[in-house]
Image (cartoon, rainbow, N blue to C red):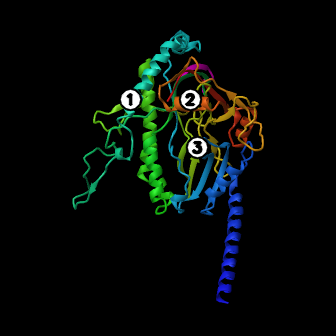
């Protein structure tokens, strides 16, 4: 009798667990905002979203139009919201936290050609691409060599020790406040290049031909340190604690400094005039100069978007926090699209518009295109890895063009060789008319315009 009762009780418990699981699943589905998706989520993507939301009911997820399962089997293209009080272990932290794209606008030279809307430096670079290739090759090789011996990690973070005394507090640290405790060098970027484009000012409405240096990447080893830290302490701290942590502040700033150092190195090699500033966080007491970013867009970020909400962005950015437009690379060889914001301020610091949108409606924006792997013999225009064929506009890019430079043995060349062996042809999701219409639904005003940055020379890391 007792065994029968126990079995009956176990059956009831299992039934309750199944019912609870079904309730949690339906609740998780309700917390997935799919308003702005361009094509339906696959079954794997739906299961991943449900798994992200299942541990806590105080979470939600906004799907970006560029969502996909990448080559590593990871779901990307979303914004994850969580209450500040929830466990940090449920946050979908990426191994590439605070990777992003930074752009610095070169100072335009004066003269008659400049007044006529022609940048003679851009014409000079375009007329001698072989010299540009050699210079970019030198920059990439130097970055690769230096990064092998001085990689950034959490061991490079500032060491700020304090001592309390009746006469007042005192620093006990051997290092300067907020300065790195150890020297580190930037790592090879995803890409860095010199671009040119035509813009119209908000004030005088005169077309100008400008040069830009764009760098995309981050700090791999330091980002892995951050990822492992969340795995270790995620269950004992809250999402709000992680956002306010020193590690987040340092890694975000260090990643930006890394990109600005690379931009400065490219400007020095090519003799381009850019705005610079002293890197006061440098370990060296002499310091060094880095480029001043004109526009920056992070692909992976963590922010507090409300008083009690922490948001994790994965291949997406917060439009409310955008200070000078949003950078959205389609492909390094194709160029970078700079989506401008509204003309709220007409000063030189926000020449590409300010933030836009609202978290209550959308408040997020995709940060780039993505590759679609197709077998060479298959029909173009369909995403073959899906069970249900969905029409996806794509553009085929020939990587090894005259204006593209790679470093022998780089991650890019290794991945490209692997694709060649598998007879895969990488085509990239195209920013077509349906995509632009969808961005308007995401609160971007099309009248603000887009600046297309066209590549002169691009280095792939």
Instruction: Tell me if mark 2 has few (under 14), some (14-19) or many (20+) residues whose alpha carbon lies within 10 angstroms of its own.
Output: few
Mark 3 vs mark 1, foreground winner is 3
Name which of mark 3 and mark 1 comes first in the sequence. 3
Classified by dominant secondary structure, the portion drawn in magenta counts as strand
Mark 2 and mark 3: Cα distance apart in space:
17 Å
In the rendered image, residue 350, in percent from the top left (x then y), is placed at 55, 33
Measuring 67% from the left and 74% from the top, which residue is drawn there?
Answer: 14
* Whether residue 301 is situated above or below residue 244 in the rendered picture: above
Q: What element carries label 3?
A: loop
Q: Using the image, tell me which numbered label, if any, was put on residue 316.
A: none
The residue to which callout 2 is attached is 417
Please name whichever residue, 404 or 210, is drawn nearer the observer in this view of the structure.
Answer: 404
Please name whichever residue, 4 or 350, is drawn nearer the observer in this view of the structure.
Answer: 4
Q: Is 207 included in the stretch rendered in magenta?
A: yes
Mark 2 vs mark 3, foreground winner is 2
Span highlighted in magenta in the image: 203-212
* Whether residue 23 is situated above or below residue 79 in the rendered picture: below
Q: What element carries label 1?
A: helix
Q: In this view, does 255 lie to the left or right of 30?
A: left
In the rendered image, residue 18, in percent from the top left (x then y), is placed at 69, 69
Q: How many labels does the image show?
A: 3
The residue to which callout 1 is attached is 145
Instruction: Tell me the quarter of the picture where residue 432 sits.
Output: top right
Q: Is residue 91 left or right of residue 255?
A: right
Quadrant containing the N terminus is: bottom right
In the rendered image, residue 318, in percent from the top left (x then y), is placed at 59, 45
The residue to which callout 3 is attached is 72
Q: Is mark 2 on a helix, strand or loop?
A: helix
* Whether residue 280 is situated above or below residue 235 in the rendered picture: above
Mark 2 vs mark 1, foreground winner is 2
Q: In the rendered structure, are the residues bearing label 2 and label 1 in contact, judged by CB atoms less than 8 Å apart?
A: no
């Amino acid at each position: 009798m007792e065994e029968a009762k126990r079995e009956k009780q176990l059956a009831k418990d299992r039934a309750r667990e199944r019912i609870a699981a079904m309730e949690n699943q339906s609740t998780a589905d309700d917390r997935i905002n799919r308003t702005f998706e361009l094509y339906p989520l696959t079954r794997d993507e739906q299961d991943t979203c449900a798994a992200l939301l299942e541990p806590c009911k105080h979470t939600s997820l906004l799907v970006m139009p560029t969502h996909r399962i990448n080559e590593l089997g990871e779901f990307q293209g979303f914004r994850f919201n969580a209450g500040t009080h929830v466990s940090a272990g449920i946050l979908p932290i990426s191994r590439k936290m605070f990777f992003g794209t930074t752009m610095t606008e070169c100072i335009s030279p004066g003269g008659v050609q400049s007044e006529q809307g022609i940048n003679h430096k851009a014409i000079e670079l375009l007329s001698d691409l072989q010299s540009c290739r050699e210079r970019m090759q030198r920059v990439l090789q130097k970055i690769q060599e230096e990064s092998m011996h001085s990689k950034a990690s959490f061991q490079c973070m500032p060491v700020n020790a304090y001592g309390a005394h009746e006469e007042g507090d005192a620093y006990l640290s051997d290092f300067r406040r907020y300065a790195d405790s150890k020297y580190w060098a930037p790592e090879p970027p995803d890409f860095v290049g010199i671009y040119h484009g035509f813009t119209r000012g908000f004030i005088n409405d005169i077309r100008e031909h400008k040069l830009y240096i764009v760098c995309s990447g981050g700090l791999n080893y330091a980002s892995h340190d951050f990822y492992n830290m969340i795995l270790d302490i995620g269950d004992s701290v809250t999402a709000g604690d992680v956002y306010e942590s020193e590690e987040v502040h340092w890694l975000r700033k260090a990643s930006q400094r890394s990109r600005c150092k690379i931009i400065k190195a490219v400007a020095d090699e090519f003799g381009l005039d850019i705005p610079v500033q002293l890197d006061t966080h440098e370990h060296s007491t002499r310091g060094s100069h880095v480029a001043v970013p004109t526009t920056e867009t992070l692909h992976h970020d963590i922010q507090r978007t409300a008083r009690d909400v922490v948001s994790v962005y994965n291949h997406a950015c917060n439009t409310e926090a955008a200070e000078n437009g949003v950078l959205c690379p389609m492909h390094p060889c194709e160029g970078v699209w700079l989506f401008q914001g509204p003309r709220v301020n007409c000063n030189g610091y926000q020449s590409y518009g300010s933030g836009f949108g609202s978290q209550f409606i959308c408040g997020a924006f995709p940060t780039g295109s993505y590759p679609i792997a197709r077998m060479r013999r298959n029909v173009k225009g369909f995403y073959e890895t899906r069970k249900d064929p969905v029409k996806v506009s794509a553009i085929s890019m020939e990587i090894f063009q005259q204006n593209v430079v790679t470093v022998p043995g780089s991650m890019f060349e290794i991945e490209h060789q692997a694709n060649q062996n598998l007879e895969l042809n990488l085509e990239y999701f195209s920013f077509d008319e349906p995509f632009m219409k969808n961005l308007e639904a995401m609160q971007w005003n099309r009248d603000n315009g887009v600046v297309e940055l066209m590549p002169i020379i691009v280095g792939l890391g």
